[in-house]
Image (cartoon, rainbow, N blue to C red):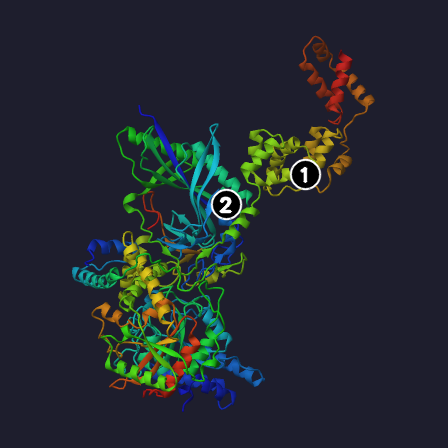
Amino acid sequence: MQLYEMTALALQKVIKEKQASIPEVVQSQLKRIESTDPKIGAYISTFPEEAMAEAQKQQKILEAGGTLPLLGGLPIAIKDNICTKDMLTTCASKMLYNFCPPYDATVISKLKEAGAIIVGKTNMDEFAMGSSTEHSAFHLTKNPWDTSRVPGGSSGGSAAAVAASLAPLALGSDTGGSIRQPAAFCGVVGLKPTYGTVSRYGLIAYASSLDQIGPFAKDVTDCALLYSVISGPDPKDSTSVMPKPFNQKANLEGNVKGLKIGLAKEYLANGLSFANRQALAKAQAILTEAGAEFVEVSLPLTQYNVPVYYIISCAEASSNLGRYDGIKYGFRAENAESLKDLYEKTRSQGFGAEVQRRILLGTYVLSSGYYDAYYKKALQVRTLVCQDFAAAFTKCNMLLAPTTPNSPWQFGEKSANPVDMYLEDIFTVSTNIAGLPGISVPVAQDETGLPVGLQLIGPAFGEENLFKAAYVLEQKGDRLGLLPRL
Amino acid sequence: MTAYETVIGLEIHVELATKSKIFCSCSTTFGADVNTQGCPVCLGLPGALPVINEKVVEFAAKAGLATNCRVANYCKMDRKNYFYPDLPKAYQISQYDLPICEDGWLDIEADGTGKRVGIIRIHMEEDAGKLTHNDKTGHSYFDVNRCGVPLLEIVTQPHMNSAAEAKAMLENIKEIMETIGVSDCKMEEGSLRCDVNLSVRPIGQEAFGTRTETKNLNSFRSVVNSISFEEKRQIRVLETGGKIIQETRRWDDELGVGYSMRSKENEQDYRYFPEPDLVPIVLPQEKIDALKESLPELPAIRRNRYKTVYGLSDADARQLVFVPAFANFLDEAIAAGATPKAAANFLMVGIPFLLKENNLTENQIPFSPAILAELIALIENNTISSSIGSQVLAELFSQKASPKEIIEAKGWSQVSDTGLISQAVAAAIAENPQSAADYKSGKGQALGFLVGQVMRATGGKANPKMVNEELKKRLS
Amino acid sequence: MRVSLEELAYVAKLAHLALPEDAAAQNKLLDEMESIINLANQLALANTENVAPTAHVLPLENVWRKDEVKNSLTTEQLLQNAPAQVANCFKVPAAITNANEEEKF
């Protein structure tokens, strides 16, 4: 097995037992990126020199008898909407094509402190708006399991990077499924943490009340490791909260005896692919075998999830994206005749079509006369969605659900009408609406061999139980250790 | 001709005297070099998040309590969305439907009568940055330093009917905010600014006329002048058969004219919604009660005390209370034994003059209230005359010494030696026989001239009372 | 529900986005907006009588910081991404060219 193919845990062991030096680990990763990323397009930018310099620095510490921090020597890929000091951070938008933040996001400070080595910034749907990474202003990212298909989105670059062994670990962000859906499409593990447990400081906002940074990894254990590093309260984020530290070790025993797992009948309705149904049945069998108990629950408001999500996310986005005006940073249109003209030209030329559509929708639902019918109504339904989940969690410890209704689609397949793509988010958006944690773990494959991931959804701060059950699914599922041929 | 009544409501912006900004830890110091007080948060860099300054909430609640408002147990921040280059995020974090304070009032006095002016609400918000326009290049320059400086917006009821009432209300707000220590209210630095909503209606008509809003007035003078300009303009429009257009107006203080900026057709659609990056603010009643307890004596009560306890006139009490630094100094000087009236006089005349001469602010009186009390005692026990007292006061601005030390060093002790005074009086009469004759023939004012001559001859040190008596004795 | 071109133009003006110029592209955008608004209109069916809007998904309140001054960025850092600058300031096309121009838009 090549160094670049290893999990983070395996690399830690290799480094600790001196089977390979940190520069060798990083060099192997960089070479893999150089040779293979042209086929995938996971990265927007890479930092080979900085990464090697850091690797050498850490190796010296190690050789001088020092100990490495938790992620010492491990390469990591970062979604390009997370600010990295003096490193290009574009949000895959022409609007920020040249933006170098003068500060690090809190998660980046934590990763640097933990010794992780940033090898590059990954592709995404522009401003995280999309489910296929087709909305990147720069290039497409291909699904490593079938390069004619999308990797999912919006964190498609991060998911594809981990799947294609272009990084053992990656960070993404999830506003309506943007970690879990690409994780499922690319056959990797992705966690959307409880809202507030990972600081959003430095995450370029799409929809502030829904956005959450989370980890991607090759397996559940690595995912838990990365989550343990990035989570925790942050005084720079008012919405940050963590009642007790996440116990990474408690999750890896795979003991699910006595756990009650709910299946929401509304999630099994029409529109779910055969492969997803099969995978659900398989997962139910695995978890039952391991001692978990299944109960039926109801989430009657499921039909409203997608409209609630699009109203809230677009409204917040229309406000969050007002700052891109060509004055303080980023793209500035030429030949503007007045201030108004500068605004309009900069924003019309700098944002892609999908972003403009969502800004228009968000502006519409907040505008005079429509606020109550749309935005306020959505917030009221949001309250009801939270209550639905709370009621379900009185009967069970977590829910088992599909991550996506279908397998990855072909490029362009869902570009005709934006709503077609929006409806693919039906199983992921509700956890964002309610601020809950959800993890997608690969369980099976569809009839063409594409990975199928399933989702476990927990109550707020229920990550430890999710990791336990995900670990069992991973160990007994069909996908453990599989790598795409590239 | 119809008689009209003017109806005025104010929106007053008060910059809070916190050390750091409302949502980040940048300094709020006025007058720093451009773009030296900014960070990812106040520059609105992508990814940055606000965290509210605890002191802003405390100051806002105190301002509400001091103006008889109800302080909300639950409030939240909202976003007000609009584009302008001095607003880096393209939204201002403010409060919309749940402000921190509501339903207050203040009693004002103007044109010899008193009235109660209602306060609709007080809310917290962030200030915008500074744009400098350059006519030559046709460009504007943006400086981030003021972005995020905390503001209170105080919205009054349309309860004022004249410029004098509006001015009195603004003065009341200013002295209250200064007294409770939430703002230094320096109008010249823009830390107190005011928008005037004004309409006119025929006397007796109940319905309000169409109102205009004159924005960003930053001196009492411009408030008064813009109001008299606007009420005249509106009446003229109505008298000539025109209609008032609801609009925003700008006041040019130099030219003394107001002009229209934009009309109602372009009225803003601010798309307010709850700020998702901040969490609700909950103030339990006990906390609000404790804040109320902690308020210092408010100006209205203080004015009353000055009149009843210190025996000051209404005008003097007003003048002193208007400058909390002076009022505090007065209270301390009196506590140290000073006679109220004498101390009040020093704080109304001599001290303000010398502060100005020495380029000092009201908070920078260079000696303690006890020193003033000592000076007053020395005058009252005839150690020095009151004119020497003024000279000692001036000395107190240039050296660190007690009044006694200054008097000794300068040899300014009052002469009460009968022999010396008698000699000087004799000399003055001898040198001014005409004046002496005048006095004797009944022209009383001639005495004053002779006293002056004696004082001059003794370098101002002679006890004036004794000089008077000696003169009268010799001329009788 | 069809969004009218006027409504779309109004919203675009608020958002400072230019609408496409040719009618075909405008119609496509109107169609897209219509299908999204129709999706949003499904919410009308939900019974939300006496339901409070969510203020925050977690029961958080009173998160604040002490009134302390910490280091700002340097002027150079503040301006490092500015497309145009003059004399340590961000350069902006004239915001007000004459007295009648809107102040904020």
The Cα atoms of the two marked residues, 2 and 1, are separated by: 28 Å
Can I make out residue A332 in this image? no
Residue for point 69% across, 29% down: B387
Q: Nearer the viewer, residue A24 or A129?
A: A129
Element class at badge 2? helix
Residue A47: name its quadrant: bottom left
Residue A480: name its quadrant: bottom left
To which chain does the residue with label 2 belong? B
Q: Residues within 10 Å of mark 1 (few under 14, many from 20)?
A: some
Q: Of all residues shown, which one is farthest toward the top?
A: B441
Question: Which dot, 2 or 1, sits closer to the camera?
Answer: 2
- Looking at the image, is B120 positioned above or below residue C39? above
Amino acid of disc 2: Leu
Residue A332 place in picture, x, y as percent:
34, 61
- Looking at the image, is B312 positioned above or below residue A75? above
Dot 1 corresponds to which residue?
B335
Placement of the C terminus of chain B among the 4 image quadrants:
top right
Residue for point 70% across, 41% down: B399
Residue A216 place in picture, x, y as percent:
39, 78
Q: Residues within 10 Å of mark 2 (few under 14, many from 20)?
A: many
Amino acid of disc 1: Ala
Residue C90 place in picture, x, y as percent:
41, 56
- Looking at the image, is A232 positioned above or below residue B56? below
Query: B115 left or right of B359?
Result: left
Can I make out residue A185 in this image? yes
Residue for point 38% across, 75% down: A396
Residue B92: name its quadrant: bottom left
Element class at badge 1? helix
Q: Nearer the viewer, residue B281 or A231?
A: B281
Dot 2 corresponds to which residue?
B65
Q: Which badge, 2 or 1, comes first in the chain's sequence?
A: 2
